[in-house]
Image (cartoon, rainbow, N blue to C red):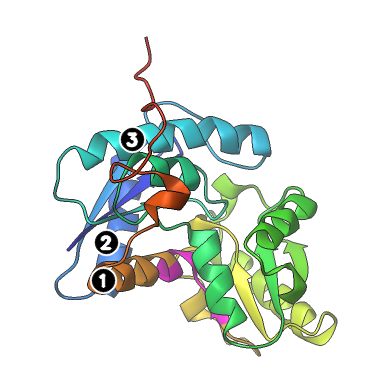
Amino acid sequence: MKIAFVVPNVGMNPEALDQRRAFLQSHARPDTEILGFRNDDGPAAIESETERDWASVEIARHIARLSQRGDIDAFIPWCAGDPGMIAGREAVCVPVVGPMQAAAHYASTLGFRFSWIIPQGNPRLNRLRVEGYGLGGQLASVLELGTPVLELRNDLPATRAKIAELVALAAERDGADAVVLGCMALFGVAGTLDAPRPVIDPTLAALNMAQSLVAMGLTHAPETYGGTSGPVAEPIPEKV
């Protein structure tokens, strides 16, 4: 199977894009090929609803265009805010897996309550989105690292140390049974932590859910999302 991810960060260089592709490939099934793409227009990073909405249109347009190849079995928006997920599902008939939705549902199976760690921003909006996925009652807390998205990997040891502090806080103060890292820039970090609770990497949550859906022959209900197999709305137009 082939799974493609679309990065919203327009400034990401080819080396950084390939680093992310290689990480997913190293965790994928032997029969899975990972393809990576980047938006040509949009924000440098997503740290607000304005940036998320801006990126969403470009991600959905990218997904619609890439689907015309006919050989991609699933898509992943490379952002834990799930930009373009719903619009992407409306545009294609293969799975479009949101990392936030996937990670939240995995977290809900590991205990009664889970916490969410974000780089910085508005915790209320993250809570609202988790509630929209039907899991608001299990969300113990949303905690901030206080670091911009584009700076998270500048000093990974310091980032790991801060995450470890927040995981301990989520467990001890908020009663979290699991913790989700709410940013794709933190790919690979969860597996390096010595944490008192399970910590979920949203990149791997999305990858494994995408692989599972493809392997089971499942995709989104056309009655819900439209898609090319259902009552799809007008396709996203190319820019003029």
Q: Residue at x 52, y 75 (%)?
A: 190
- 57 left or right of 232 in image: right
| On screen, residue 181 above or below 185 | below
Which residue is at the far right? 173
| Pointer 2 residue | 22
Q: Look at the numbered discs 1 and 2 and tell me whether their residues touch, using CB distance below 8 Å.
A: yes
Where, quadrant-wise, is the C terminus in this rendering?
A: top left
What amino acid is found at the position of numbered circle 3 in the picture? His
Residue range in magenta is 199-205
Report how far apart the C-alphas of labels 1 and 3 lie in the structure.
24 Å
Which quarter of the picture shows residue 183? bottom right
Q: Which residue is drawn at 40% across and 47% down?
A: 89
Give the number of the disc on residue 62.
3
Q: Residue at x 30, y 42 (%)?
A: 37
Q: Does the magenta stretch include residue 77?
A: no
What amino acid is found at the position of numbered circle 2 in the picture? Ala
Give the number of the disc on residue 26.
1
Question: Sequence-wise, which precedes: disc 2 or disc 3?
Answer: 2
List x then y, in percent, for residue 111.
65, 88
122 and 95: which is toward the camera: 95
